Amino acid sequence: MTKNPWAAAQTTVQCQHCNNVFPAQRINCIDTLLWPEGRQLLDEDAFFHPVCPQCQTRSEISYPSRYIDREFGIAAVLVPDIESQQPDELLPYMNRYLGRLALDGMEHRAVGNFYAMAEQMRIHQHGLNDRAVQLLKPIIIGSLQAKGFEVWNGFFMDLLHPEGAEQMEDTIYMSTQEDAEDAYTGDVYQFYIYLTNGDIIPRGINNTAYQLCMNILRDKKLADDDGQFHLYDLSWAINIHNSLYPN
């Protein structure tokens, strides 16, 4: 494995269970051109869930970091808790402080945690539109909330290619008059939905839903990327959906 030129020696973590303080590797930047193995590391969340050597409890860490992947065309900057910034402060912040990190020919994203950074890697690995993927989340989360689940967030994990027309479990199937017969044969977008109690529920949604979200983006002239930094997250997606049905 090649050495990551931007890996800091370590940071310290306080265990959320026993309060033990222990060292963990801190990764300031994952540039896959210089460190190809970083992509795999980002896909495996162990490095941002270090294990306490005293009680074996997994803790979650977050710190400023970057992910640059020229092959996939994505450059993401992790700003911890950026989602909590007020909307009127967010755009000036990104233009003023993140704009200087822009790279030619890339899509630029701000994310608030390593879950979202890894999600950007998976989305672009499959050549998907990340705004459309974000718009799928309120559909899935809304169906769980209707059943009484308390949801924190959800993150894209994989694009599945089912064989035949067999209906997959825990998957939402949407259809239109044009593709009603193909509703069960298309790709399925797999998500992990994180509940507030820490449980993770796998859920899928079909390609028709993705295409409908792409139509929403085209109607709102958001389908094409402008090369600037943007934060596209669950709150953004909820606001887009709400704008379709104003009070």
Image: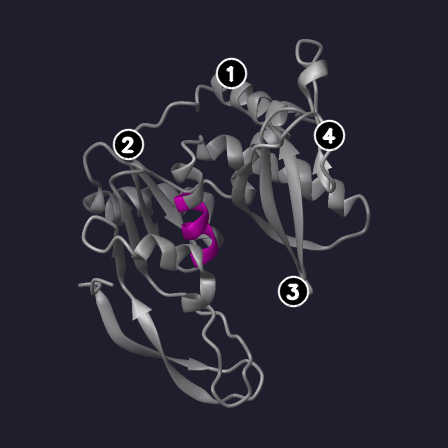
Within-10-Å neighbours for mark 4: few <14, some 14–19, many 20+: few
Judging by the rendered image, the residue that carries numbered circle 2 is 227
What residue type is disc 3 on? Gly
Judging by the rendered image, the residue that carries numbered circle 1 is 219
Which is nearer the N-term, disc 2 or disc 1?
A: 1
Judging by the rendered image, the residue that carries numbered circle 4 is 166
The quarter of the picture where the N terminus appears is bottom left
Highlighted range, magenta: 113-121
Disc 2 to disc 1, how far (Cα)?
Answer: 20 Å
Query: Residue drawn 45% across and 67% down?
Result: 46
| Relative to 37, 235 lies left or right | right
Judging by the rendered image, the residue that carries numbered circle 3 is 198
Within-10-Å neighbours for mark 2: few <14, some 14–19, many 20+: some
Which is nearer the N-term, disc 2 or disc 4?
A: 4
Circles 2 and 3 in contact, beta carbons < 8 Å: no
Q: What secondary structure predominates along the stretch shown in magenta?
A: helix
What residue type is disc 4 on? Glu
Disc 1 to disc 3, how far (Cα)?
Answer: 36 Å
Which is nearer the N-term, disc 4 or disc 3?
A: 4
Depth check, mark 2 against mark 4: the one in front is 4
Disc 4 to disc 3, how far (Cα)?
Answer: 31 Å
Depth check, mark 4 against mark 3: the one in front is 4
Which is nearer the N-term, disc 1 or disc 3?
A: 3
Is 234 placed above or below 128 here?
Answer: below
Disc 4 to disc 1, how far (Cα)?
Answer: 32 Å
As helix, strand or loop, the secondary structure at mark 1 comes to: helix
Circles 1 and 3 in contact, beta carbons < 8 Å: no
Nearest the viewer among 84 and 205 is 205
What residue type is disc 2 on? Gly
Depth check, mark 2 against mark 3: the one in front is 3
